[in-house]
Image (cartoon, helix red, strand yellow):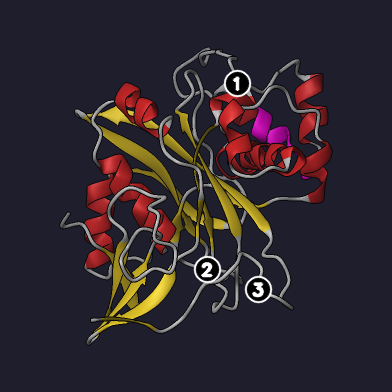
Amino acid sequence: MIKKTKQSGDITPMGEPKPPLAATVLVVRERKGSLQVLCVRRHPNQRVWGGVVAFPGCKVDPEDATAPADAVHPRIFEFSDDPTTERACAVAAARELFEETALLPTDEVEMPSAPGSRSWNQKLRLRYEPGRLWTLLASSAIELRLSQLVPVSRWVTPPMLPVRFDTRFFAMRMPLGQEILRVGTENMDCFWAFPDEILDQFERHELEILPPTQWMLFYISKFNSLDKFFEAISKLPLHIVIPEIFQNNDRTLLVLPGHPGHSQRPRVVVEPTYFEYCLGQFIINRKN
C-alpha cells in the first residue's frame, strides 16, 4: 500500500513566492567507449547546497533577460509559454558555464600555440569581469551559439523544502579547442566523471549529490556515444518535474511524475521514477 504523505501541488502554492529561476549545463564527451560529464564540487562554505557535486550552473540574473542572445535551440520553448524567460535561462546557462569553467557554446576554434600554453577561452576567462560578458565577447569578436545548448529537463524543488529553484537543464558537447579553467570561490573542484563511477561513490556516502543530478547522471550512463545521447534527449518530454515524498509502508520514497505514488500520473520522465531514503539521503533506484 502506497500512502501519500505530502503533495507537491503547483509550482507556486497559494501565498508562496515563486522559486527563483536557475540553469545548468551537462557538458559531455566520449572517453573509453563511454560518456563522461563535467562536474563541479561546490565549496562547503556556500550558503546553498555547499559541498554537493553538481553540474556548472546557478541562478538566472535579471540582466540575462536583456542580453543580446542569438538564436536559441527551438525546443526550449517547450519548457513554458514565456519566451523571455526561456531565453534568459539559456543565456544564464552559457554565462554560468563560462564563469565556472571558462567553456563557451561557440564555433570558435583556436588551438594553443605551444604545449602548456593557455587556450583562447582560458585567456578570455581571465579577462572577464562580472557583469561584462557581452562586452568582452563583442570586443573579442566572439559569437555565442546558444543553439548548442540542448534542453534536457525542467525540475522544480518541492514546496516543502526551504530552498527552492525552478531549474532548466541543458546539454552540450565539449567544445573543440577549448580547455577547462576553474575560477572563483563557488567551486572547490571541477572534474570529468563517468556517471556510474560517481553514483557508486555517492552510494558509498563518499560525496553528496542531489536527486536531479543523480537522475541526469543515471540517464547519461545508458549511452556510449554522443550522437546516440543527443538523439535521445531530442525526444525527451520537457514537462515540469516536481518530486513528491511518499511513504510506502516502512520505506520513504521521493517519487517523480508517473510513479504510482505521485499525484501526477502521466509519466513525464523516463525510468527510474523514484529515490529511496537511506542513511540521510535519497538514493536513485538504479535497478530498473
In the picture, measured across the screen, residue 91 lies left or right of residue 154, that is right
Q: Which mark is residue 49?
A: 2
Q: Look at the numbered discs 1 and 3 and tell me whether their residues touch, using CB distance below 8 Å.
A: no
Vertical order, 235 against 1 (above or below): above
Residue 26 in sight in this render: yes
Amino acid of disc 2: Trp
Choose top left, top right, bottom left or bottom right for residue 31: top left
Q: Which amino acid does label 3 sit on?
A: Pro
The circle drawn on residue 173 is: none
Amino acid at pointer 1: Thr
Image coords of residue 283 (percent x, y):
29, 67
Q: Give how far apart the Cα atoms at labels 1 and 3 are.
A: 39 Å
Going from the N terminus, do you reach mark 3 or mark 2 first? 3
Q: Position of residue 137 (x, y in %)?
A: 75, 25
Q: Name the residue under label 3.
A: 13
Please state the horizontal and vertical placement of residue 143, each as a whole percent of the image: 70, 18
From this view, report whether residue 250 is shown above or below residue 127.
Answer: below
Residue range in magenta is 124-131
4 lies left or right of 25 = left
Q: Nearer the viewer, mark 3 or mark 2?
A: 3
